[in-house]
Image (cartoon, helix red, strand yellow):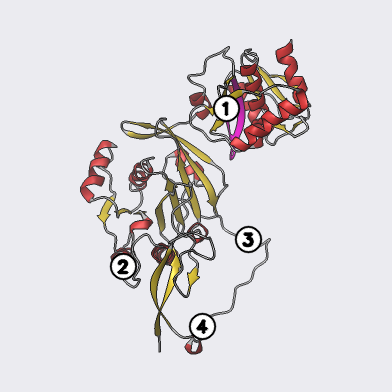
Amino acid sequence: MSTAYSLYICQQCGANHNRWGGQCQSCHAWNSLVEEYRDDVPKGLKKLHQGPSLEIVTLDGEFKAAPRKASHMAEFDRVCGGGLVPGSVLLVGGTPGIGKSTLLLQVMAQLSKNYSALYVSGEEAIEQVSLRAQRLKVEKSQLLLASATNLSSILKSLDKKDGPEIVVIDSIQTMYLDTLESAPGSVAQVRSSAQELIRVAKKKNCIIFLVGHVTKEGSIAGPKVLEHMVDTVLYFEGDQNHQFRILRAVKNRFGPTDEIGVFEMVEEGLMEVTNPSAMFLENRQSNTTGSCVFAGMEGTRPVLVEIQSLVAPSPFAAPKRTAIGWDAARLSMIIAVLEARFGIPFVGKDVYLNIAGGLKITEPAADLAVAASLLSSLKNQPLPDNTVVFGEVGLSGEVRAVSQANARLKEAEKLGFERAIVPKNTHRKENKPEGISPLTQKAITSVAQLLDLFDA
């Protein structure tokens, strides 16, 4: 016989408490405990499930590759690992207004040409979604629309024999189950709703997109376990003041992680950018102080971006250190290395660093390009034109090698760059492409050799 009881669930971390308290004992958040009612079977009456034995295989056995359903949007398929795998669940997160619904509506319109697709909106009426489809010029597609927040009715529609093959739930925070007393968006509702949708996806072998809200800290709202439950986690990034958007895979069970797709927001929706390097460097001015082109890697794709810096006298006792698109702590480290190891004065000067185009760089290979940009602005002397820079800088001022140097240099050659400042042990082992002149490489082992460019 089941017994009803109540628990207090933290809305921040999902921890269970037997009684209410002002502060969660797990994550120490204040006023985050909400009472929820449970109806579980007592442990003494539970029966073990007598299921079949496990099917055990070896690691070197023959396995079939996971089938893929391509959307024919090259940038989207690249991030997903070449297409969508049946039975998978994908979580798409992003800040409000960044274009998550626009992206998925365009993707679903493409997929509906070959597969039965359903778009379920819990935040907008069908008329609103239809108006967006008209603006995106996809209203003639075979995509089906529905507006609902009750998960029970959605599950009934998905569990039919002729149910849709691909489904979008926009958003998971608006869905609720009748069996739970908590409000939509709570930890229990988000977790239970996701579990039911994942169960249906595996049972019916369909593909489900879950749209997730993002908190002010930049993480997907709801329990952290939500990202562990799904197969793929995609973040749609970008600045609303920039027209460029980045779709980034941070988890993918069926493909590589840290892969990116680049889109441009225009009046008709999102357009794919097939050559991101040319796009990020489109408005770059030559012979400008504080400007340096960095050859970076985003997943398997080489991307060239412009790093801009400005070093100016500070009217305050504590100078500012501001970084947009890069780690501010790493900027402080580069400044400290230049000051302590090479006597470059930054005392009494504000330092501003910007990654042009709205891209966020996380790899340490940008250290040398940042140092070159800072020195160029401080000494008011531009870097040699048509030059790319990459390399990691250590605390003693040494320049260390980075991975995938050949791909970085090849991308620079394609865009017409003639010189490269790289770590000393960077080698080109592959043949030069026909019709492309090889780069003139300046291999350095220390930032001191970088200083020679400005002292000459």
Q: Estimate the x, y position of residue 100 in percent, counting from the top left.
A: 38, 44
Nearest the camera: 173 or 298? 173
Instruction: List the single residue furthest toward the front.
Output: 317
Q: CA distance from mark 4 to mark 1?
A: 56 Å
Q: Looking at numbered disc 1 in the image, what kind of residue is underneath it? A: Leu
Q: Quadrant of the C terminus?
A: top right
Q: Which residue is mark 4?
A: 49
Rendered position, 206 above or below 318:
below
Q: CA distance from mark 1 to mark 2?
A: 48 Å
Q: Estimate the x, y position of residue 171 in percent, counting from the top left.
A: 36, 54
* Crowd tier of the residue under label 1, counting other residues whose Cα lies within 10 Å: few below 14, some 14–19, many 20 or above: many
- Residue at (23, 51) in percent of width and height: 125
Residue 304: image tag: 1
Instruction: Choose mark 4 or mark 3, whichever is in front.
Output: 4
Residue 152: image tag: 2
- The first of marks 3 and 2 along the sequence is 3
Instruction: Choose mark 1 or mark 3, whichever is in front.
Output: 1
Considering the numbered disc 4 on the image, is that residue within a helix, a strand or a loop?
loop
- Residue at (61, 22) in percent of width and height: 349
Q: Quadrant of the N terminus?
A: bottom left
Q: Estimate the x, y position of residue 106 in percent, counting from the top left.
A: 35, 42
Residue 303 colored in magenta in the image? yes
Residue 62: image tag: 3
- Tell me which segment is drawn in magenta: 291-306
Mainly helix, strand or loop, the magenta region? strand
- The first of marks 4 and 1 along the sequence is 4
Q: Are marks 1 and 2 in contact (CB under 8 Å)?
A: no
Considering the numbered disc 1 on the image, is that residue within a helix, a strand or a loop?
strand
- The first of marks 1 and 2 along the sequence is 2
Considering the numbered disc 2 on the image, is that residue within a helix, a strand or a loop?
helix
Q: CA distance from mark 3 to mark 2?
A: 39 Å
Q: Estimate the x, y position of residue 361 in percent, counting from the top left.
A: 57, 35
